[in-house]
Image (cartoon, grey):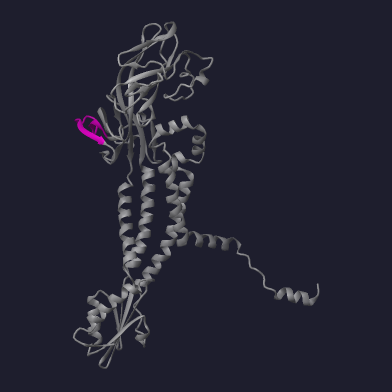
Amino acid sequence: MSVDELVREEREPRQAGMGPVGWLRWGWRTLTSMKTALILLFLLALGSIPGSLVPQRSVEPDKVAQLYQQNPTLAEWYDRFQLFEVFTSVWFAAVYLLLFTSLVGCIIPRTATYLRELRRKPPAAPKNLSRLPHSDSFEGDLTVEEAAGRLRKMRFRVVTGDGWVAAEKGYLRETGNLFFHVALIGILLAVGFGSLYGYRGNVLVVEGDGFANTVAAYDRFIPGSRVSAESLQPFSFELADFKATYQVEGDKKGQELDYSAYLKVHDEPGAPARDYELKVNDPLEVDGTQTYLIGHGYAPVFKVTDGKGQVAYEGPVACLIDQKATLTSSCVVKAPDAQPSQLGFLLRFLPTSVPLTDGNYASAFPGELQPQVQLLGGYVGDLGMRSGKPQSVYKILPDELDGKVVPVVRGSFATKPLSVGESTELPGGAGKLEFTGVKEWITLQTAYDPGRVPALIAAAVAVVAIALSLMIRRRRVWVRVREGRVDVGGLTRTEGSAAGFAEEFAEIVKALSAGEQHVR
C-alpha cells in the first residue's frame, strides 16, 4: 500500500462502535423514555383482554373444564399460552416489571428537573413586551410594588427588579404530571404486595353444606408466596338456601333476573351465626376477606344401591351446565364402594322436562318446575378411582374404561327420564339408581388482597393528578413600569393553550389597570 493510500485511509471517517457500555446506555434510555412507558402501558391493557374473554381458572374453573370437554385442542393452545391464567402468566409479569422499571426511570430525572424548576425564579422582563404573544399597555401611575401586590393576589409567584415585575404560575401542572407517574408506580406496588400477601380460592358449595376458610376446604387455592395456612381468616358459613328468579314470559323467557344465596355466617370459631344474603357484586366481607358469588347450578340427589343391597352412595351430585339458557346439565355418579363391583352413571338433568315430538326430552325453562333425570350410561367394574391417577369427578370416559368395566346400560336422549322418587334397576342385579330430590349449588371465589385499598387510593391520586396536568396551564406575565406608562406582556408555556390564556390575560390587565387609563 502506497503512502498516499495510507494517508487517504487515515483521513476517511470511520464509524465508531457503541460498545457494550454504549448499548447499555441506549437500552436504558429507550426503556425509560415516555414513548416506551406508553407502549408498555398499552401492552398491559391489551394483555388484560384475554383475561376478560377467556375463562380464568382462578374464577371459573368449571367453564375451563367445560372448554376442555367441548374443544380440547383449543383448550390446550389456550393453556400453552397461559390464557387460562393471564394475570399470573410469565408474559404478563414481564410486561408488568418492564413497565415498573420504565416508570421509575422516568420519574427520577423528572423529579430532579421539577425540584430545580421550583427553586428557579421567574426570568426578568424582556425589554420589548409588545413582541410577546399577548401584550397590552395603559397609562397610569402604577408602581412596581403595586403591580407585584396585585399579581400576588392572583396567586402568581412574583420577582421584582428595577422598573419591572416578573410573575409565573401553573406549577401544579408538572406536579400533577409527576404525581400521576408516582401513582402508577403505587398501583403496581399495591398489586405486587397483594399478590405476595394475598390469596384466592374457589369452592363449590351445595345447599345444606357448609364451608370453613381452610386450605383443605377449597377446590382450588392460589396463595401468595408469603401466605401460609395460618394466614387465613378463620370464618365459616353454611348455605341455608338458594333462590333464583327468571323471566317467565316474552321474548326473553328464561333469562336470569336475579339470584341470592342465604348464608349462616360465623365470623370466627364460636361466634354466633348471623344471616347474610350473598348476591352478585355484593360480596361477604370478613376481616378484609371477600367472598363473591360467581355462579350456580343444580345438584340432584341420588341413592345408589349395589348388587348386595347395600347403600353405596347417597347424596347430591353437582352437575356441569351444558345449556346456559335452560340449565340442562350433565351429571356423573360414581360409587367406588359398591359391591361386588364399582358402579358409575352418566346422567342428564332437565330442570323443566318436556317431551318433544320425536320422542326426545328437553328442558324448556331453567327453573325447577318439572325436574327429571335421563340415564345415558351405566357402568359396572373398576372405574380406576383407586389407581392413583387423578380423574375428574365430572367425567366417565368410556374409551378409557374399555376392558375394565362393562357398559350395562347404553342410553340415549330418548330414554324415558326419571322423576323425583323414581328409580331404575341395572341389568343382572348389578344395582339400582334412585332419584330422590334436587338441590342447588353455588360457586364462590374467596379473595384476600391487602393491596386493594392502597391500589384504590393510588388510582384516585392518579385521576386527580392527570386532571391537574390537563387542566392547568403554565404561564408567565411581565410588567414594565415607565413614567406614566405600564406595559404588560404574557405567554403560556403549555402547547396549544394560547387561546385559553387570552381571556385570562385580559383579566390580568384589567386587574392591573384598575383605576388607570387604558390605551392600546
Q: Residue at x 43, y 61 (%)?
A: 106
Whether residue 269 is situated above or below residue 378 in the rendered picture: below
Q: Residue furthest bottom?
A: 483
Question: What segment is highlighted magenta in the picture?
Answer: 258-278
> Picture coordinates of residue 493 (x, y %)?
37, 74
Q: Residue at x 44, y 18 (%)?
A: 412
> Picture coordinates of residue 421 (x, y %)?
30, 14
Q: How many marks?
A: 0
Q: Is residue 41 visible?
A: yes
- The quadrant in which the N terminus is found is bottom right
The residue closer to the viewer here, 3 or 151, is 151
Q: Is residue 149 visible?
A: no
Q: In the image, is residue 129 part of the stretch drawn in magenta?
A: no
* Magenta highlight: main SS: strand
Q: In the image, is residue 270 part of the stretch drawn in magenta?
A: yes
The residue closer to the viewer here, 88 or 279, is 279
The residue closer to the viewer here, 427 or 444, is 427
Quarter location, residue 21: bottom right
> Picture coordinates of residue 266 (x, y %)?
23, 31
Whether residue 106 is situated above or below residue 330 in the rendered picture: below
Quarter location, residue 507: bottom left
> Picture coordinates of residue 89 (x, y %)?
46, 43
Whether residue 512 is situated above or below residue 279 in the rendered picture: below
Left or right: residue 9 versus residue 177 is: right
- The quadrant in which the C terminus is found is bottom left
Quarter location, residue 366: top left
Whether residue 346 is situated above or below residue 30 in the rendered picture: above
